[in-house]
Amino acid sequence: MNFALILFLLTLATGALWAFDRYWARKRRPADGKDPWWVEYGASFFPVILIVFLLRSFIVEPFRIPSGSMIPTLLVGDFILVNKFTYGVRLPVINKKIVEMNSPQRGDVMVFRYPVDPSLDYIKRVVGVPGDTVAYLNKRLTINGQEVPLRKTDDYLHPGRFVYSPRYVEKLGEREHETLIEADVPPYVQQTYPFPMRDNCNYNTEGVVCRVPPGHFFMMGDNRDNSQDSRVWGFVPEENIVGKAYFVWMHAESLLPPKGIDFGRIGSFK
């Protein structure tokens, strides 16, 4: 469902009713006359819908994390906020950039339109920027021939599953973040899609090496062995960018007990 398009159409419809009432119909109603139903249930909602549309399109947009591909950074049920202008101002619906600002950096957690199906929004971490050569071989990440620093820390206990995963701290640029790497999962990519510019990638029994083309980004999940990402479906084009994720404002796998809302998850993340 294209919620941005639906909200845009609602803004246009209620705005048209509001303008028609304000500049024509209202002047022809008796001063003590009751507003018709289309004003009460249509035009009166226009200011609220307009504010929501502008905030969601140009300032900030909420998302819910649906999968575990970004564990331990983001959990299933996290509600996050996405900055819509960090990477430039874009027109809503068509997602065309009209104002240049910052470019995604290695280590950013970014929301983007899934290249295989742009109607879906995905969230992963930026690992490679245009021109980078990204290698993920034998569970070690290398960028432009430099091995990304990685150190072992305490194992991660998955909430509610009583299963541990090996946890590491990885440093991309100046940023550190946690990642899970399962020792018993094979290092090679088991399935890939016929994505554009697939010739930029070389797959083997040790993993994959990809050269990131201009205007594209290489994305990976922090839950490395449980993430379908650029290793599987290819590069993310710049025009698919939605925004930079930066804040967890609520966590709720369910609004009902025993899980309910976990306010301890509120805050920023790396």
Image (cartoon, helix red, strand yellow):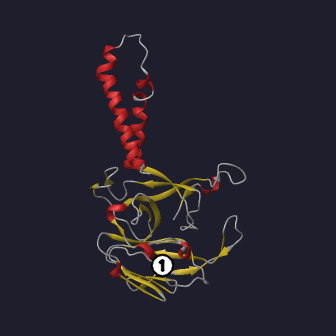
Q: In this view, does 40 lie above or below 14?
A: above
User: x%, y% of residue 42?
Assistant: 41, 29
Image coords of residue 197 (percent x, y): 32, 76
Residue at 67% in and 51% down: 260
Q: Residue 173: tell me if it is visible.
A: no
**Residue 41 sits in which quadrant?**
top left
Q: Is 241 situated above or below 106?
A: above
Residue in the foreground of this view, choosing between 163 and 120: 120
Amino acid residing under circle 1: Gln
Q: Place residue 117 in its image quadrant.
A: bottom left
Q: Which residue is tagged 1?
A: 191
Residue shown at the point (52%, 84%) measured from the top left: 187
* Residue depicted at x 56% and y 63%: 67
Residue at disc 1, secondary structure: loop
Up/down of 83 relative to 175, above or below: above
Give percent across and percent down for residue 21. 34, 23
Residue placed furthest toward the bottom: 205
